[in-house]
Amino acid sequence: MKIVDLIEKNKPFISLEFFPPKDKESWPAFFEVVEKLKVLNPLFASVTYGAGGGTQSNSLEIVKQMKQDMGVEPLAHLTCVGATPENISYFINSLREAGVENILALRGDAPKDVEDFDFNTQVFKQGSDLVTYVNDQHPGMGIGVAGYPEAHLESPSIKEDFKWMKYKVDEGGQFILTQLFFDNRVYFDFCERLSEMGINVPVIPGVLPIMSLKSAKFILSLCGATIPGKYLSALEKAHADGGDEAVYRLGIDYATKQAQGLLDGGAPGVHLYTLNRAKACLEIGQALKF
Ligand code: FAD
């Protein structure tokens, strides 16, 4: 079933993001984490594609196993930078054969080893090109798109970013999954501005439970989201006073309150970045009564 239809029937919901472990020896432990998190009854589990060095065939195999062996509804991320229409169609046909009906259509980032990479040299130049292609060539596929409540890093202005966000939805994006953020006001503001532009598809907020200072700083450096100064100071103080355990506790409490605030404010659900760990998301999900 398309995720956009599942959303309508199951509000409010929790959903989860995983990344494919590079090394196949760690797959059994990975699937154990997914199994543990099934108690939260996630609406879907998204699996990243090609990010952080993970391979595309691993993403494909993992979503297949989730769907066929674990009864979890996968959302397969798919990037189009460097891709050809044939590669994309091969991936989508493989998903369809496995019964997987939903993708998150993404452009992807410039390759790290190419200086001044120009997306205009690509067959697919933007995420919206992938949306258009999949809609035309693979009708019936569920398509989500990425949204940036604090604007995409490359965007020259917030206004310009909203313009392209609208275009991506008009081309067939059925729901928006957001970049992580820590201040709920940016999410509600984002939704309001989209609604004023006539964009009324579900906007699923992404929430990162901070589990350690080091990993949080690493993730933030990659995605461009900002952390409120007050929260960062509190995390640093927790680390100085009580070490990693105190940071973990603060991170879980903050994410729980943040997720509760999003649901209370009318978000259709919350999407938790699991970092492939069960404990933190279990605590948060159970506190939210999922
Ligand atoms: P686009 O929608 O193409 O937007 C990129 C930039 O181009 C924006 O600044 C936009 O304003 C601008 N733009 C868009 N269309 C046009 C146009 N026609 N003309 C001019 N400018 C335009 N990366 C991975 O590699 N793998 C993953 O699994 C992955 N998962 C993600 C999940 C989520 C929820 C999010 C938010 C991001 C994820 N990313 C992933 C990162 C993503 O690939 C990068 O942020 C990438 O730089 C942008 O992808 P996009 O699809 O949002 O791009």
Image: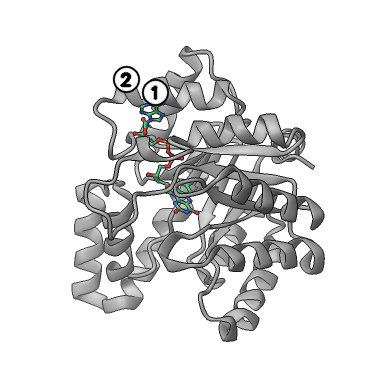
Q: Residue at x 70, y 65 (%)?
A: 38
Residue at point 70%, 41% (across, down): 3
Label 1 neighbour load within 10 Å: few <14, some 14-19, many 20+: many
What residue is at 48 percent from the left and 60 percent from the top? Answer: 50
Dividing the picture into quadrants, the one containing residue 287 is bottom right
Q: Secondary structure at mark 2?
A: helix
Q: In this image, 31 relative to 72: left or right?
A: left
How many angstroms separate mark 1 from mark 2 (CA)? 5 Å
Mark 1 C-beta closer than 8 Å to ligand 1: no
Position in image of residue 209 (x %, y %) = 43, 59
Q: Nearer the viewer, residue 96 or 8?
A: 96
Q: Is residue 176 visible?
A: no
In the displayed structure, 232 sits above or below 181; it is: below
Is residue 254 shown above or below 57?
above
Amino acid type, residue under disc 2 in the picture: Lys
Provide residue 142's location: percent of width, then percent of height: 70, 38
Please give the residue where the numbered disc 2 appears in the rendered image. Answer: 159
Q: Position of residue 72 (x, y in %)?
A: 74, 59
* Quarter of the rendering containing residue 269: top right
Q: Front-most of 230 and 170?
A: 170
Q: Is 89 left or right of 161, judged from the image as shown?
A: right
Q: Quadrant of the C terminus?
A: bottom right
Q: Residue at x 27, y 49 (%)?
A: 227
In this view of the protein, which residue sits in the foreground, 141 or 15? 141
Which label number is shown at residue 196? Answer: none
Q: Which mark is drawn over residue 162?
A: 1
| Residue 1 as seen in the image, left or right of residue 195 | right
Residue 9 can be seen in this image: yes
Pointers 1 and 2 in contact (C-beta within 8 Å): yes
